[in-house]
Image (tube, grey):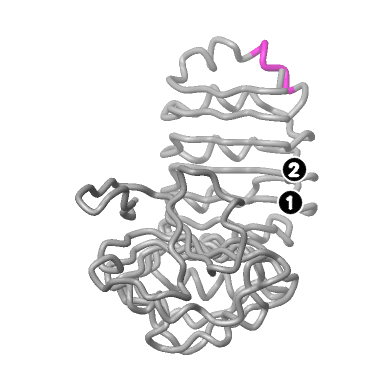
Amino acid sequence: MATGIRYRSASRLVVADDLVLLRRRNDRGVFGPERELVFFDKPILPERLARIRTAQLWAPHDDRIERLPKVLGEMENLTSLTVSGGSTEPSLVGEIRAGDLPESLEELRLLDEHGGVLTWPEVVLPRLTTLFVSDVFRFDGSAFPRLRSASLKPDRTQANLREALRLPLEELNVLNVSLDERIFEIVSARPLRRLGLLAGTKLASLDGIQALLALESLRLKNLRALADISALRELPELTRLDIQYCRRIHGIDVLAELPSLERLTLVGCGDLGLAGVREVIDRIPRTTIGATS
């Protein structure tokens, strides 16, 4: 990931990833001394703006930001922007105009969760490769022509997932799986390398995942109905498997049929009968197991 620049003195520059954009009137004591603070409502030297690579936009819940600060569009080398949860008004995304964000931007994370639908305006981010949005997010794929990784909460018809899958995605994280096994019919529209299915109550099995033959990494988290994971054996390229808080799953012996697996995470899954596959687990180079037996 690209880095921002922290100024410690007039003569010394230190690389940092913790630059925070905020107003002068807001409580700077929220952040520790290790965080570099930049006040977007005071003049900033152009040469300093040019050195900023990553930024986090923040405001307290009772003083939310209504429009993106003008200074963001002047950060010609900004590659990563995170908009903190609780920091903006619901209307902010719809008010974005051409030039409000620099064309250099490669990563955008909108962490505010207002419970509604955000619609991206006709603004193109030509270099964006990574997008994370906590709310339901609708957009035209032409706005993000180089998108490689998307983390999205689907709308009722899954239209925004389908739109994302028109792009050259390698990774998709579905933040709320509202379908059963039909989700695999949708996500198989692209030869994804990484897939995350994160929260949901309808997905009971992984039947259909075999359509994703190129899948290398799979994350399953908070899927309350998920039980049958036997279809994992149909993923010959799988090197990373991460299952968390899926307490109904069974058939963990499928691990023996994943010869390419290099990294395994099992957390909060209860009694899976790991004793029966201990030798298999011991052969996996990297494992993380917690609250699972």
The quadrant where residue 93 appears = bottom right
Which numbered tag is attached to residue 169?
none
**Label 1: few (<14), some (14–19) or many (≥20) C-alpha neighbours in 10 Å:** many
Residue 136: x %, y % from top left: 66, 71
Q: Is residue 180 above or below residue 103?
A: above
Tell me the kind of residue under disc 2: Leu
Measured as percent of width and height from the top left, residue 37 is found at 45, 57
Give the position of the C terminus as an image quadrant. Answer: top right
Residue on which the image places disc 2: 226
* Residue to which mark 1 is pinned: 203
Residue 90, given in percent of the width and then of the height, sits at 67, 78
Dot 2: element: loop
Question: Could you say which is closer to the camera, residue 273 or residue 212?
Answer: 273
Q: Which residue is depicted at the point 69% across and 28% down?
A: 251
Q: Name the quadrant containing residue 95.
A: bottom right
Q: Is residue 153 visible?
A: no
Q: Quote the CA–CA distance across marks 2 and 1.
A: 6 Å
Highlighted magenta segment, given as a residue range: 272-276
- Verify whether residue 17 appears in magenta: no
Marks 2 and 1 in Cβ contact (< 8 Å): yes
Residue 274 colored in magenta in the image: yes
Q: Amino acid at mark 1?
A: Leu
Q: Residue at x 62, y 22 (%)?
A: 289
The residue depicted at 36 percent of the width and 65 percent of the height is 106
Camera sees residue 88: yes
Q: Position of residue 122 (x, y in %)?
A: 46, 89
**Image quadrant in which you'd find residue 278:** top right
Crowding near pointer 2: few (<14 within 10 Å), some, many (20+)? Answer: many
